[in-house]
Amino acid sequence: MSKVMVVTSGKGGVGKTTSSASLGAALAQAGQNVVVVDFDVGLRNLDLVMGAERRVVFDLVNVIQGDAKLPQALIRDKRLETLSLLPASQTRDKDALTEEGVGRVIDELRERFDWIVCDSPAGIEKGAMLAMRFADLGVVVTNPEVSSVRDSDRIIGMLDSKTQRAENGDRLEKHLLLTRYDAARASRGEMMKVEDVLEILAIPLLGIVAESPDVLTASNVGSPVTLHNPASAAARAYTDAARRLLGEDVAFASARAPQRQGFMSRLFGRKAAAA
Amino acid sequence: MSFLKFFMKNRSSAPVARDRLQVLLAHERALSGRPDLVAVLQQEILAVIAKHIPIDRDKVVVKLDRGSQVSTLEIDIEMPDEALARS
């Protein structure tokens, strides 16, 4: 039974695309057959984050409009053969997507993959609505920051009302993925804590991804962080989140503030990170 | 003292964010599906008043203050004395 999972947030820049790529890769690394679909028509970026930007020939809009067959548009990852990408069109706009067309593509993808990860565009317009329309579960990516939490609340309301599952009266699982979290700042009262965000949004926690230079490094080189640097804290957070999606009961790594680093290790730590 | 205050203020910004969000979202959730309630209220109240007194719609100030327990809708209507005398 394949699962359609939308990665959404309302607000832009919180880490939807990074999280789609990383969760997709982590699921694929766990042996699942995964396709990550970019719904951000006109502003595609998933191809870049996954390092497949030079291999895009056809895209989602071509498949919907019948200019290409689905297998022609799917791009198989070079590092992980269980991971594929269906890119968005860069030249069209979101009106090129139709509900009927997206539904047809999703049905076809269900026959080939265990997981269909839909990377939603920001906003609440057509692209975002169609990315969530056929979802079985939703991952709401949120930063511990007021505008992101407010937008997430709005998106949770839409997952509960605008999806096909909601309209049929079926349950749609929702999970919170808290990204760019800084435990040290939260412990100093400068940033909302995990518990604060959970209390406000009232959906179960899927993972906490700490603010980390490894995430930027991974996108710089076009590789999901779980592939590029599997030992990093960010990669472990995504790997744990993927295991939870697969039904495993994984304890949350303590969100304790990191030890204060000494002057020398800070100096050399920075140098190492920049290298 | 003000030096201390500066630090206290910085330290306690996260609870402020949480409280502001809780109040805001309680209202947004309650109003989902009818986001223009304030506009409707304003129009209908004005229509009632306009039935009896000539009012200038540009001289109407509507303020909404959303509290955690009670919200206040404040409608400030300027009524010219001459209009009152005529009616």
Image: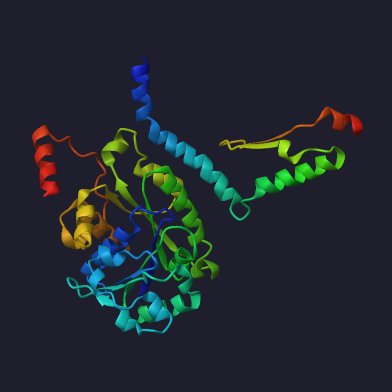
Q: Position of residue A216 (x, y in %)?
A: 23, 53
Residue at 48%, 38% (x, y): give it: B20
Foreground residue, A61 or A174? A61
Q: Position of residue A100 (x, y in %)?
A: 49, 78
A187 left or right, relative to A148? left
Foreground residue, B43 or B65? B43
A88 left or right, relative to B24? left
Residue A97 in view, yes or no: no
Foreground residue, A50 or A164? A50
Q: Position of residue B44 (x, y in %)?
A: 76, 46
Q: How is the image coloured?
A: rainbow
Q: Position of residue A20 (x, y in %)?
A: 31, 63
What is the quadrant of residue A49 in the picture? Answer: bottom left
As displayed, is residue A178 above or below residue A89? above
Residue sitting at the far top:
B1
What is the quadrant of residue A38 in the picture? Answer: bottom left
Residue B44 in view, yes or no: yes
Foreground residue, A231 or A126? A126
Residue at 38%, 81% (x, y): give it: A108
Q: How many marks?
A: 0
Residue at 52%, 66% (x, y): give it: A166
Residue sitting at the far right:
B86
Q: Quadrant of the N terminus of chain A?
A: bottom left
A82 left or right, relative to A196? left
Residue at 14%, 42% (x, y): give it: A270
